Image: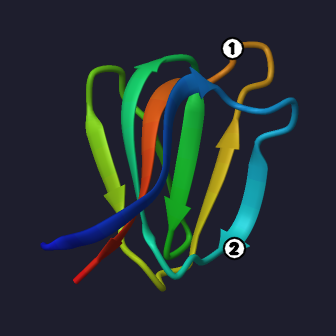
């Protein structure tokens, strides 16, 4: 995977509401999980984000994101154009 540009990045808790069903983006999204309780769904199967793991969601793929609002998701995230 080649990264041609990074459009945004940060280390933070998610916004007040973090529930995104059936999204797709023209860029890859990368998460490094620091804490909290969140889940991603791909092809109808839901998986938990695991602390100290890195996740890469490729551009133009449909997926869903949600968190447990009682345990805010905390991560480093990167939005990057890749090829």
* Image quadrant in which you'd find residue 32: top left
Give me the residue at 67% from left, 73% from top.
23
Give me the residue at 86% from left, 37% from top.
17
Number of labels in the image equals 2
Q: Nearer the viewer, residue 73 or 48?
A: 73
Question: Which numbered tag is attached to residue 22?
Answer: 2
16 left or right of 7 in image = right
Q: Position of residue 75 (x, y in %)?
A: 48, 27
Residue ID for mark 1: 71
83 left or right of 50 in image = left
Give me the residue at 47% from left, 81% from top.
61
The quarter of the image holding the N terminus is bottom left
* Image quadrant in which you'd find residue 62: bottom right
Question: Which numbered tag is attached to residue 34?
Answer: none
* Image quadrant in which you'd find residue 80: bottom left
Mark 2: secondary structure: strand
């Amino acid at each position: 995977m080649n990264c041609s540009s990074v459009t945004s990045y940060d280390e933070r808790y998610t916004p007040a509401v973090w529930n995104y069903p059936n999204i797709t983006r023209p860029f890859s999204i990368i998460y490094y999980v620091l804490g909290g309780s969140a889940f991603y769904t791909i092809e109808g199967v839901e998986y938990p984000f695991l602390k100290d793991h890195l996740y890469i969601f490729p551009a133009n793929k449909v997926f869903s994101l949600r968190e447990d609002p009682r345990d805010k998701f905390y991560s480093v995230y990167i939005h990057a154009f890749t090829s």
